Image: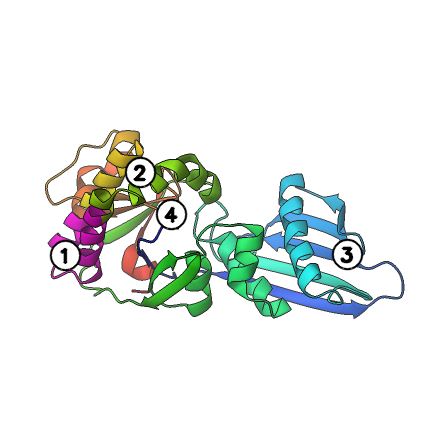
C-alpha cells in the first residue's frame, strides 16, 4: 500500500463460479448462492437487478457488499443486467474462516464474468492494494508493490527446499484485512515517511527476495515481523499464543495481522505441539505454489 514490496504466493485451493443467464420479459433478478468446501450453502441472496435491491438474503452485510459489486458493474456496463434473470453459484475449496482469499478470488471470477479489470473492481468495492487479486489472476508467486497509486508486480520464485519444513497453521480466527489495515494506516504512513525505517525494511526485503539458505530466509522473516511489530505496536503470534521464541524457530503471521494463519517451521511445531493441537496444520509445500 505504501511503496514497499510484498512477497505473495497462490495456493492450490481456490473458488469456482458458475453463471446461468436467461431472458426476462419483466423485472430482472439475480439469485446468488455461495457454498463452502463441504458443499454447504453459507450465503444466499435474491436481488432485484433493476433497482439493485436485496429481495431476500441470509446475511444483510454480505448482500450489501454484493450489491456494491453489482452496482459497480452496472455503472461500467449499463446494459449488462438488463432483460435477463441470472443465477450465480460459487463454491470454495477452502474453509470460509481460513483467510485464503474468498474475496480476492471472487473479484477475479467476477472480473472474468463481466470482462472488467479485476484491479478496478477491487479498488472500487474492497479497496486495499490488490496484491491478492493479482495472485489469484496470475496463479504464480509474485513481488507486488504500489507506486503513485499504480499497481506493479514482477515474477518471484522461492526454492521449495527452503520451505520443506514449513507449516501453515489455520487459527480459525477470521480477520478482516480492510479493518486490520485501517487500524494501522496512520502508523504505516509515518513509517514510510521516515527514511531510516523504510531503508531498514527495504534491506530486509532485499534479503528475502534472494535468500541464500533456509536459515537466512527464516531469520529475515522474523526480523521483518519483529521490526513491524515494534513500529506498529502490534502483538506477534508469540505474544498472542504465549509461545517462547526458540533458536532456529519460525513463527510469523500470514494474511491479516493477528489472525487467519501463522507460518511456523518444524522446530517451532515440535516444541509447541499442545499450542497448535486444536488448529488445522498443513505443510507449506503441499498447499502453496512456490
Q: Position of residue 126 (x, y in %)?
A: 54, 50
Label 1 and label 3: CA atoms lie apart by 53 Å
First of labels 1, 3 by sequence position: 3
Residue 214's mark? 1
- Asked if one can make out residue 71 in the rendered structure from this viewpoint, the answer is yes
Query: Which secondary structure lies at badge 2?
Result: loop
In this view, 93 is above or below 260: below
Q: Quadrant of residue 147?
A: bottom left
Which residue is under mark 3?
A: 49
Label 3 and label 4: CA atoms lie apart by 34 Å
Residue shown at the point (67%, 66%) measured from the top left: 19
Q: Range of the magenta residues?
A: 199-221
Q: Are marks 1 and 2 in contact (CB under 8 Å)?
A: no
Which residue is under mark 2?
A: 277
Q: Residues within 10 Å of mark 3 (few under 14, many from 20)?
A: many
Q: Does residue 16 show up magenta in the picture?
A: no
Q: Position of residue 269 (x, y in %)?
A: 22, 43
Q: Residues within 10 Å of mark 1 (few under 14, many from 20)?
A: some
Amino acid at each position: 500500500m505504501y511503496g514497499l514490496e510484498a512477497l505473495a504466493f497462490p495456493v492450490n485451493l481456490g473458488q469456482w463460479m458458475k453463471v446461468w443467464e436467461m431472458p426476462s420479459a419483466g423485472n430482472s433478478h439475480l439469485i446468488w448462492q455461495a457454498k463452502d468446501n463441504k458443499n454447504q450453502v453459507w450465503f444466499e441472496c435474491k436481488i432485484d437487478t433493476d433497482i439493485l435491491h436485496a429481495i431476500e438474503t441470509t446475511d444483510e452485510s454480505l448482500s450489501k457488499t454484493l450489491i456494491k459489486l453489482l452496482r459497480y458493474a452496472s455503472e461500467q456496463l449499463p446494459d449488462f443486467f438488463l432483460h435477463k434473470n441470472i443465477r450465480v453459484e460459487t463454491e470454495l475449496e477452502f474453509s470460509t474462516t481460513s483467510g485464503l482469499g474468498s474475496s480476492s478470488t471472487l473479484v477475479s471470477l467476477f472480473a472474468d464474468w463481466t470482462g472488467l479489470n479485476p484491479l478496478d473492481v477491487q479498488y472500487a468495492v474492497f479497496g486495499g492494494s490488490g496484491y491478492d487479486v493479482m495472485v489469484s489472476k496470475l496463479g504464480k508467486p509474485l513481488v507486488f508493490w504500489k507506486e503513485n497509486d499504480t499497481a506493479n508486480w514482477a515474477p518471484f520464485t522461492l526454492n521449495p527446499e527452503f520451505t520443506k519444513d514449513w507449516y501453515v497453521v489455520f487459527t480459525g480466527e477470521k480477520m478482516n484485512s480492510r479493518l486490520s489495515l485501517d487500524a494501522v494506516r496512520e502508523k504505516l504512513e509515518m513509517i514510510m515517511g521516515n527514511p531510516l525505517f523504510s531503508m531498514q525494511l527495504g534491506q530486509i526485503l532485499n534479503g528475502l527476495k534472494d535468500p541464500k539458505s533456509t536459515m537466512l530466509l527464516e531469520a529475515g522473516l522474523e526480523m521483518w515481523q519483529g521490526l513491524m511489530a515494534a513500529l506498529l505496536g502490534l502483538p506477534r503470534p508469540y505474544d498472542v499464543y504465549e509461545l517462547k521464541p526458540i533458536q532456529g524457530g519460525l513463527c510469523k503471521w500470514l494474511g491479516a495481522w493477528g489472525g487467519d494463519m501463522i507460518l511456523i517451521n518444524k522446530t517451532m511445531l515440535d516444541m509447541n505441539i499442545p499450542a497448535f493441537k486444536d488448529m488445522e496444520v498443513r505443510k507449506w509445500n503441499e498447499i502453496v505454489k512456490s
